[in-house]
Amino acid sequence: MGSYILKRLISAVPVLIGITVIVFLIMAMIPGDPATAILGSYATPDNVAKLNRDLGLDKPLVARYFIWLGNMLTGDFGRSFSLNRPVLDEILERFNATLILAGTSFVICSVLGVLAGVVSAARQYGLADKAITFVVLIGISIPSFFLGMMMILLFAVNLKWLPVSGMYAIYGGGDLPDLLSHLIMPAAALSVVATGVIARLARSAMLEVLRQDYIRTARAKGVGEGRVVYGHALRAAMVSIIPVLGIQAGFVLSGSVFIEIVFQWPGVGRMLVDAILKRDILLVQGGVVFVAACYVFFNICVDVAQSLLDPRIKT
Amino acid sequence: MSAALKVTDLAKTFPISGGLLGRQKAGVRAVRPMSFEVAQGETLGIVGESGCGKSTLARMLVGLLDPTEGRIEIEGKALDNADAAAFGRLIQYIFQDPVSSLNPRKTIRQIMEAPLKRLYGMKRAERDTRIAEIFDSVNLREEFLDRYPHEFSGGQAQRIGIARALAASPRIIILDEPVSALDVSVQAQVLNLMRDLKAAFGLTYLFISHDLAVVEAVSDRIVVLYFGAVVEIGRAQEVFANPRHPYTKLLADSAPVVGRPLTAPEQTSSELPDPLNPPPGCAFATRCPRATDICRQSDPQLEQVGDDQYAACFHPL
Amino acid sequence: MRFLSLLFRNRLAAMGAVVLSLIVLLVLLIPVLPLQDPDVTNTADRFLPPLSEGHLLGTDHLGRDLLARLLYGTRLSLAVGLFAALIAGTIGSAVGIVAGYFGGRIDNVIMRGIDMLMAFPYILLALAIVAALGPGLLNALIAVAAVNIPFFARNIRGITVGLAGREFIDAARLSGMGHGRIILTELLPNVLSTIVIAMSTTVGWMILETAGLSFLGLGSQPPQADLGSMLGEARSSMITNPHTSIVPGIMIFLIVMSINLLGDGVRDALDPRLRSGALARPQARTMVRRKAPLPADDGKGLLNIQRLETQFHVGKRVYRAVNDVSLHVNAGECLGVIGESGSGKSVTALSVMGLVASPPGVITGGAVRYEGEDLLAAPYESLRKKRGEKVAYIFQDPLSTLHPLYRVGDQLAEAIQVHHRVSDAEARAKAIELFRSVRIPNPESRIRNYPHEMSGGMRQRVGIAMALANDPDVIIADEPTTALDVTVQAQILSLLDDLRRERGLAIVFITHDFGVVAQLCDRVAVMYGGRIVEQGTTTDILDRPAHPYTKRLMACVPELGGGKRELAAIPGLPPIVSDLPPGCAFAPRCHKATPACREGEIALDGGDARAVRCIHPEEEIA
């Protein structure tokens, strides 16, 4: 097992390098003088010159890439001009908030999605199946940002059950219950689509598995139906569900950008959108690379979980 | 008269991607260097169990797989699979799964036309006459031409596969388990048809199968493969009636025969050696009741053991 | 046409189609509708509520007519989403086909690149692209298309790899076709439906994604608006004037939902597996809907199948897989059931313990009696308790019939523990003992293997050990050696024979091989077209077959030791059980058939010892 984890970690290195190359190339597409583009047209000539020197923008593309990569490896992601602080500091602070939001949503959608899908498959064409299918269909069709706005209208503005936005109350907040009350709506809005997608997939994976010969074997042995469905079939279905959980984690992370905007959640997503609108390119670059790298490591965990479940994967 | 097909030291090794740094380990030797000849108009049977390399051999012969070493000659000329059209006019292949060998989205006519167009550049009218001729010779009705493959049963689909191979007017046809997907009652129809076609068109067959009785019934000579190597070659009526290699004997004794009492043939184990890490010496030694020390040390070579019969064994029966 | 009728048979898909066409129709009618200019501001009329005069849906924060903005925005969103899907679908599919067809190094390089792109959560890549190109609808379209390319490439590559390994691609190569031609004429037609399915299920996504970018202010720029930017602009006044948010929000929802419904419908209509209804979940036991009265218990045998009828109901077609079959087996006896594919032999076997997949399988008549009790009428729990405990099965392909994720020892232990309260340690000890009894070497270490770590012969021994786990009285073996090599088959058969003698088992042995029947079975029933055509002791049937089918089938089987020879054949094809001819099913292929053979029911004449269903039998039976 240890050797498998090591192997996966090593295989992540080229992926991480690829990520930096892609981000670097995309940023190199920015037309015109990069420094002016990064700093915006109102930048002083001094600032432009300084940035050109800092980034070595006078050097060729390949050299620039390695300078940038080298700096990042030493923890220097550059300095955000719009916030006037190191990019990494800002990212680390914001990432914490995103992790709380996206993590909660991911747990919700994984548990609910798999549960709904399995129940739906177990009672195919029954009332529960029809109800779940219908709710799921609505769930995957509704834009999360619209759903978030409607939730604010209903639960915060009209019913006044929950705070409108933010992560903590401005006065007197800061403890766990305060955080939770702020977290409920955004986490729920964020998990709806992913829950729907996972439920659909889990349902079809279960239906596929339930037709397999080894399920018939289990029945022929006299194994009861509950154990057939929730033991034999679910375990086999998890083999195709787990990779989808990994992909959906990416979607949850993506969706958090919108939710953070709607709910004024102080996370990386909101930071990125602000940075783009302010053309704070270093902050965008750093944020994208950082989050993508975290996602790569999350996917390694998914693969390890998969290899624990499926002995056919060589360890 | 030169041989229709001559194979010299033909071998295939599948590389295995190496460990962490991608270093090349020794690969799996699916086919060990083997040599044999097929005479003009002959049917050579190739028989062996799973893992013996018979399908790899077949795919190399028709150019779908490049050999690692060795050469293939057809009618005295070395085979060159660079020119697909020239190649297709010499040798054709009939597949194990007849339905899967027909493109589900094409009509039978489109399937039949491909070799005529690509290999011979025939015009429309010419093609139609030729297809009619071929269909007549395999007993298929022309109305089938505008249907799609899923409308046919396995036996009919295999006739269509045969018709397609004939359309290329090849000299040699490789038959890879052509009837093992068919029911017994249909199997004989197809086998008899192929025998008639062979006489009518002067073809040479290489007939690959795991079914000993079928191979014996259609072949002139038989090659027995085990673990990628030839263990015995001989005339069809001799090989199983009078096997000289212990593995051939085991095969012959294992085939269920009406009226023979049920006894598992004597052997110490039933497992093939690990292909990733094969033991030295004869691959059959671990299962062989006659094995001695020499069998576990060096590879036996194919040696003449009787009239036109060869066996690769230190202690032939 | 067939596709459309299939599509609209799905009510939800039809509903989606109706809603979507209404929206598209409205959008297409924009030039002729009396709409106001969507971009003319009139701050005096800001935030008019819906149903105001002159503004059906009210106005927004700049006093612009919401209805006009909604329709123009919808047009823009639809167009952008559709274009993004087309671009992503085309490029992604092309990449996927090339990678999947050529394989090897090309595949490796391409898929590594795709994996890199997939390593980003999609929005990050889109944000990076928009950050570089600058905000704008066209750039948002490019970003959305780009982040969806990997999805198509992966999907299509997967399908292509499967197809490229298929034999018809090899056949095309041997017909002299080049790579380009094979890709265009052999592969593309076969992946096209998958591409269409993938597109129709992702258009909705792409509309959502572009709307999302616009919502963030990174897509369409003012004054032009798509649905996303309308929602984004309305957000600041959401609390005071919710209608400006709700109107575009509902529209996005309607569009995406109708596209999703339609997409699901397209998928179901194009996917042949779903079309035949095969994805229905098989129930815990086969459905029983007996039409004929229950046959009286005649007290024969330990297991007694009486006048069994099993059918498959697929759409309007009825496949009569098993038709009036009666069989029985005594303790210590081996009954062979022989027939070709489609003869109903396996369905007969599976019907006994209700293991025929249902739907589509239905038992429509007869009885299955075990020690006199009718299993078809028994409550589920009572049937379940007999499965494996009294009547056990051995199946054909031991790789697909063992659970791939459980250790073989655990699967064996489970077979014991579902029927008996024994500790894990005891079950394990019993498993080792069973492995030893089926002659698996090193049972102590073998029980820790997974099925994929064993050879075919060893796996089938596990299958047999599992069947023996609870000392059943009857074992039903459904072609247990068909997937095995001859040398292994011989060993498995002699193992079964020994076990039967040692334990006094009753075995029902299903096979298509006369050689196997001859060696193992005491009595034989021959099936054709879902019926028993002949039955008797093995020696009688083999020496003096009475039914022309039996006689001629046996002549077809080549026997080892005969040398090169002409083989006997039966002309024609086996019958299709959804379209059986009246009278004898074999009549169309039979050289002795007379008009009488083609009409009316032909009875199985004779007794238990010897019976034949033929008007012109080859042998007179006593």
Image (cartoon, rainbow, N blue to C red):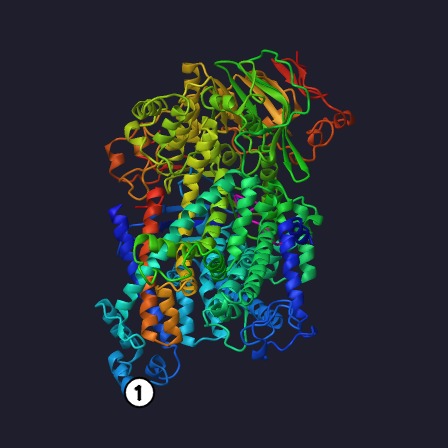
Identified by mark 1, the residue type is Thr
Q: On the rendered image, what quadrant is the N terminus of chain A found in? A: top left
Residue C288 at x, y percent in the picture:
61, 27
* Residue closer to the observer: C48 or B151: C48
Q: Chain of mark 1?
A: A
Residue A132: percent from the left, percent from the top? 53, 45
Residue lying at 48% horizontally and 68% vertically, measured from the top left? C235
Say what secondary structure mark 1 lies in: loop
Q: Please report the residue visible at 47 percent of the width from the left and 22 percent of the height from the top.
A: C385
Question: Hey, which residue is sitting farthest right in the picture?
Answer: C595
Q: Is residue A307 magenta?
A: no
x and y percentages locating residue A238 in the rendered image:
41, 44
Which residue has dot 1 on it? A44
What range of the chain is rendered magenta? B92-107
Left or right, C87 with respect to C585, comes to left
> Who's the residue at 21% across and 68% down the image?
A74
